Image (cartoon, rainbow, N blue to C red):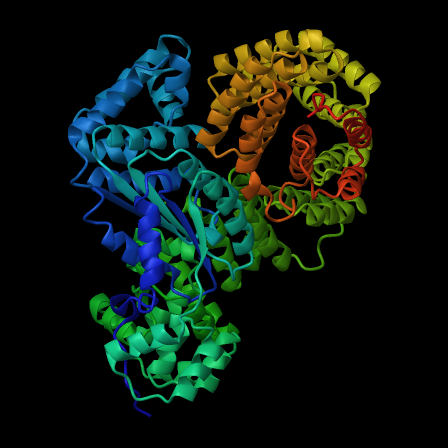
């Protein structure tokens, strides 16, 4: 059957027709000085990418620098994200060489600690692309460092510069943007596919959202139909809205939109009833509407929507040339992260007889199998991948996976950043022995920066090891899977893996590891009573040659006692913590954390000692040069000042903590700092400021506290105090608030609320 054909998807830009209202609103938000940030969510195929691409095009006359990023794999690291965006900056005609020279020259003048930690990996692509003296800049900074460390060669120091941590990379990139902005050049950043991102890349995105230069804007998109999509959308939207941006759930096209589309491309006539039925069946998704407007019957579209093989897809696939079929099969089998490596993508057609990449791309675009992503690279949509995989079946998929592996292994290219995807490809090709042999080392490496990718790797390994997990080796594997689950926020699943592991554990080191992993999961679930017992067990099991681990566990136990309001045990563990730390030569970061714990405990139970401890925490943090630690130390200073009645100084310290939390997208530190600030403002009698501080936190608690349960309870408690202080009526359910705390094992709030209701005045909360 011959059917009419619409233009290729990327040319017609699906989702734009009928979207003028949304597009105008998006543009208005991005250009409004107080907003400049937008997040699009929506189901698969609804037109998010089209809307972002159209918006970016419309901003060309408004912005000097346009940056785009497509997230296709959780294995993409923050360093890779920064590198991709920095490379685009380097290739932009709008960014002057003098601007980059200014940036790197200023960086070279930094104090040793800061220069060492700032994200010098940026030099790799940005400087080499535009600066003739890039090598000299690296050597200059390395020479500065060498002056303080005679044992390290300049080459070793230069290598260390390129291995900067995630926070430092983000800070360096943010500073690069600010330098460009200070030179009068505005810009727009677009990031698509954030449902695929690791938590560390999401945090990198949050840092950009929280601290964007004034003349720059950012647009983000998340597929909320994917498993991780809703959680990622919520995490980003709360901070984005807090910073003045807008989150928009993109809906399917309505009748007017479909009619506008039909008028533009003049497909075969459709009756009103058929149009309404098509909108109902497709949920207004342009991806599927395009199939219907091209002649596909609605029952076939319904099959595709249900992830069932639709005969029309089979017919379209069969109509392709052998070269296009072979190439499309490889595109739909290769993990997306591997396709991101340009050398791998370029080699994907190797071995296909009479293959011509231009001709095949044109054929697949015309047949609506490929579309351009936000980065303009041609890829099959996820829905197309699903249909083609069904067409191939398991046997042919294995053959295609082996073909791709042959091409990848023939390349002289480093695919270390995509080892999880390579593991998936080996499993798909049936190379299970190699998966078992190599998998755990790959997963362990991924755990360092992407628990999401590590979790996928462990799942692949588990599939290859069916029936082989009942052993101590299997228990160690299960504990590592539990660590990956903690990294992605799936704490109940982590505890299930620990429970499974415990059934086969006898070795002391594995018993210790099991308790340590369980402790982390329990703390994240706010199950303090259980965590208290496990922490005590960990302290008994730790060997004498692990003093830093002992101190960290003692800190955790001290925090639990403090939050439970257990003054005797909190003060005794604080005393032990101080005593133990004096016997050990601690580095600045650990020393800062120790003093921070002491300051927070003293603030509640021995306020006269708290300020000095907090100042020590800040001193060590600043000496370490790690901004995250500096921010947390300022939080401790704020708590110490608040509990000693120095409310103005407390507010200032909290503001410093908030500034650093925003620079890193550190939501946890932001919330505790903002809650402490509001409490200090109330204690100082500045009700207006406290009301404003608490009101700004509303976006974080719109989900009834599911993402931040303890912080949400404290926020409600502060709101209750405000109402009582201002004699306003309150709609806060006090019994439910007390019950919420009780479920977490916290009893002090009930007594606090009773005193609050009885006396009508507030006291510093032990937070």
Q: Is residue 389 left or right of residue 550?
A: left
Horizontal and vertical percent for residue 229? 52, 55
Percent of width and height locating residue 223: 47, 58
x and y, in percent, of residue 639 in the image: 63, 19
Return the residue nearer the eye: 432 or 166: 166
Residue 583: tell me if it is visible: no
Give left or right: position of 562 versus 259: right
Outermost residue toward the bottom in this view: 1
State whether residue 564 is above or below residue 620.
Answer: below
396 or 514, which is in the foreground?
A: 514
Name the residue rendered at 33%, 28% in the picture: 175
157 or 744, which is in the foreground?
Answer: 744
Q: Is residue 569 left or right of residue 631?
A: right
Q: Would you place residue 365 above or below residue 695 in this image?
A: below
Note whether 369 is above or below 474 in the view shown.
below
* Residue 688 picture location, percent across and down: 55, 28
């Amino acid at each position: 059957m011959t059917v009419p054909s619409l233009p290729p998807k990327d040319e017609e830009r699906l989702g734009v027709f009928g979207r003028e209202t949304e597009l105008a609103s998006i543009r208005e938000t991005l250009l409004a000085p107080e907003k400049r940030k937008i997040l699009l969510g929506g189901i698969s195929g609804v037109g998010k990418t089209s809307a972002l691409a159209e918006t970016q095009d419309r901003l060309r006359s408004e912005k000097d620098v346009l940056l785009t990023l497509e997230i296709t794999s959780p294995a993409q690291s923050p360093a890779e994200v920064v590198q991709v965006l920095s490379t685009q900056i380097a290739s932009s005609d709008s960014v002057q060489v003098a601007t980059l020279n200014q940036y790197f020259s200023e960086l070279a003048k930094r104090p040793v600690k800061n220069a060492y930690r700032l994200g010098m990996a940026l030099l790799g692509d940005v400087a080499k692309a535009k600066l003739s003296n890039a090598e000299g800049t690296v050597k200059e900074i390395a020479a500065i460092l060498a002056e303080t460390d005679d044992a390290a060669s300049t080459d070793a120091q230069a290598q260390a510069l390129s291995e900067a941590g995630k926070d430092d990379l983000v800070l360096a990139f943010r500073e690069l943007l600010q330098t460009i902005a200070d030179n009068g050049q505005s810009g727009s950043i677009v990031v698509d596919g954030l449902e695929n991102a690791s938590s560390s890349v999401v945090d990198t995105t949050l840092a950009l959202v929280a601290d964007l230069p004034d003349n720059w804007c950012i647009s983000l998109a998340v597929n909320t139909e994917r498993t991780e999509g809703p959680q990622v959308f919520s995490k980003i939207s709360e901070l984005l809205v807090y910073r003045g941006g807008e989150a928009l759930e993109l809906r399917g096209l309505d009748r007017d939109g479909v009619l506008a589309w039909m008028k533009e491309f003049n497909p075969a006539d459709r009756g009103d009833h058929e149009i309404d039925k098509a909108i109902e069946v497709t949920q207004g998704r342009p991806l599927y509407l395009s199939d219907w407007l091209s002649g596909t019957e609605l029952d076939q579209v319904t099959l595709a929507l249900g992830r069932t093989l639709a005969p029309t897809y089979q017919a379209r696939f069969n109509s392709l040339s052998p070269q296009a079929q072979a190439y499309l099969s490889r595109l739909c089998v290769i993990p997306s992260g591997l396709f991101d490596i340009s050398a791998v993508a370029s080699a994907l057609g190797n071995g296909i007889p009479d293959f011509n990449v231009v001709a095949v791309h044109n054929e697949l675009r015309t047949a609506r199998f490929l579309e351009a992503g936000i980065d303009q690279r041609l890829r099959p949509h996820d829905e197309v991948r699903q249909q083609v995989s069904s067409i191939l079946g398991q046997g042919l998929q294995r053959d295609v996976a082996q073909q791709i592996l042959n091409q990848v292994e023939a390349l002289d290219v480093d695919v270390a950043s995509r080892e999880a995807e390579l593991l998936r490809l080996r499993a798909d090709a049936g190379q299970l022995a190699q998966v078992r042999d190599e998998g755990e080392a790959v997963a362990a490496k991924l755990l360092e920066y992407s628990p999401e990718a590590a979790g996928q790797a462990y799942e692949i390994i588990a599939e290859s090891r069916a029936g082989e997990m009942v052993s101590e080796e299997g228990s160690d594997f299960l504990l590592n899977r539990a660590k990956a689950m903690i990294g992605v926020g799936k704490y109940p699943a982590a505890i299930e893996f620990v429970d499974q592991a415990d059934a086969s554990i006898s070795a002391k080191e594995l018993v210790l590891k099991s308790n340590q992993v369980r402790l982390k999961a329990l703390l994240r679930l706010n199950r303090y009573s259980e965590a208290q017992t496990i922490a005590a067990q960990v302290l008994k099991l730790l060997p004498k040659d692990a003093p830093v681990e002992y101190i960290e566990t003692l800190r955790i136990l001290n925090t639990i006692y403090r939050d439970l309001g257990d003054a005797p045990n909190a003060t005794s563990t604080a005393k032990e913590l101080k005593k133990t730390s004096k016997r050990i030569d601690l580095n600045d970061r650990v020393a800062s954390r120790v003093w921070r714990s002491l300051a927070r405990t003293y603030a509640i139970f021995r306020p006269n000692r708290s300020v000095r401890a907090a100042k020590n925490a800040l001193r060590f943090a600043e000496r370490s040069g790690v901004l995250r630690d500096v921010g947390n130390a300022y939080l401790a200073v704020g708590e110490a000042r608040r509990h000693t009645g120095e409310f103005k100084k407390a507010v200032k310290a909290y503001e410093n903590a908030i500034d650093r939390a925003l620079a890193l997208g550190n939501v946890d530190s932001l919330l505790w700092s903002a809650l402490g600030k509001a409490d200090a403002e109330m204690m100082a009698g500045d009700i207006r400021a406290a009301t404003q501080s608490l009101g700004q936190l509303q976006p974080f608690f719109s989900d009834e506290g599911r993402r931040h349960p303890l912080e949400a309870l404290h926020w409600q408690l502060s709101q209750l105090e405000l109402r009582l202080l201002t004699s306003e009526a309150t709609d806060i359910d006090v019994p439910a608030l007390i019950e919420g705390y009780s479920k977490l094992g916290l009893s002090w709030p009930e007594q606090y609320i009773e005193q609050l209701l009885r006396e009508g005045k507030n006291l510093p909360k032990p937070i």
